[in-house]
Image: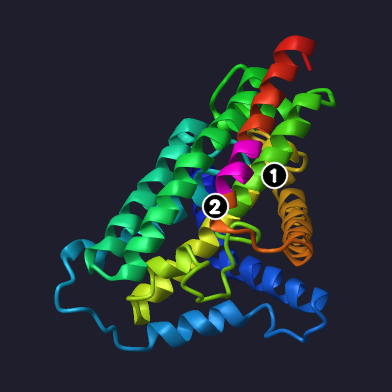
Amino acid sequence: MNLSALLFQLLQDTLVVLAAPLLLGWVNQCRAWLQNRSGAGVLQPYRKLIKLFHKDAVLAHNASPLFRFMPYILFACMWLAAALVPVLATDLPLSPAVDVIALVGIFALARVFISLAAMDIGTAFGTLGARREMLVGFLAEPALLMVFFTASVISHSTSLITIVETLAHTQFVLYPSLAFAAVAFVMVLLAENARIPVDNPSTHLELTMIHEAMILEYSARHLALIEWASALKLLAYITIGIALFLPWGIAAADHWSALPIALVALFVKLTAAGAGLALLETLSAKMRIFRVPEFMGTAFLLAVLGMLTHFLLGS
């Protein structure tokens, strides 16, 4: 194994796990600015994690091992998903494992564990949140797969590395099919990361919350790992969107001299994506939970239209 490739893989893995809270803090800060508030600063998620790690965990007496181990499994799944995405370069040791179907499977595995842990204690809120989470996942995963398949038929591969190299390192081509897929992907990103209009990450109202309802029984280091995993999931989805629709700037295979440029390009893209997400949330309103199937159905329809556009128009 190439030593430099291994070092860059370790660099990317470290970068994503450390930058995820910063991205979340940037989104929250932009949202505060757009709402004419000063905000807590982009480093607030780090301060929250440090405070939670210094507290003592409180567990219910009837908590099973699944409830105790779920935060570690969730964190590992989200870190793995974020590390597999080609953030800096495509020629990395884990590149052969970056299959889009496998990425969906990792997200689904994490969803199953957090839903089971939410129902483990037997509280009403935990069961409510788990059922809503599985509903959203049941509707979001087909739309996400169709988005991936649209990019796959263009590059003739389900490997995310091949998709990036096909779209970024060949002659510039505009694909109308990817425009439909991009809109569908943004809708899936909002739903999967518990963002407005599907969910509100800053509320604890029992009639509206989805993600927060599942983690009400967690505290201290367990809650810190869950919050960190949520930030990693947001980073993973945004970097997947960058790899699919804005892959320019990612270093090609064996072009390690392009990594500084790739790092700057990644910083600019994440900054713009975080600001755009905050703007989208500020302009949107929280929808009723009964309207979520319509929202996700629209995302699936747009993803299917993207694939049909490619097959019918060849673009």
Q: Which mark is residue 184?
A: none
Q: Which residue is mark 2?
A: 290
The C terminus lies in which quarter of the figure? top right
Magenta residues, start to end: 292-299
Overall secondary structure of the magenta section: helix
The part of the image, by quadrant, that contains residue 56 is: bottom left
x and y percentages locating residue 235 in the rendered image: 59, 56
Say whether disc 1 or disc 2 marks the residue closer to the N-terminus.
Answer: 1
Identify which amino acid the numbered label 1 is placed on. Ile
Mark 1 to mark 2: distance in Å? 31 Å
Mark 2 is surrounded, within 10 Å at the Cα level, by few (under 14), some (14 to 19) or many (20 or more) other residues, namely: few
Report the front residue among 6 and 230.
230
Inspect the magenta stretch and tell me whether residue 297 lies in it. Answer: yes
Identity, as a three-letter code, of the amino acid under mark 2: Phe
Residue 115 pos. (x, y %):
34, 56
How busy is the neighbourhood of tag 1: few (under 14 within 10 Å), some, or many (20 plus)? many
Report which residue position mark 1 lands on: 242
Placement of 69 over or under 178, stated as above or below = below
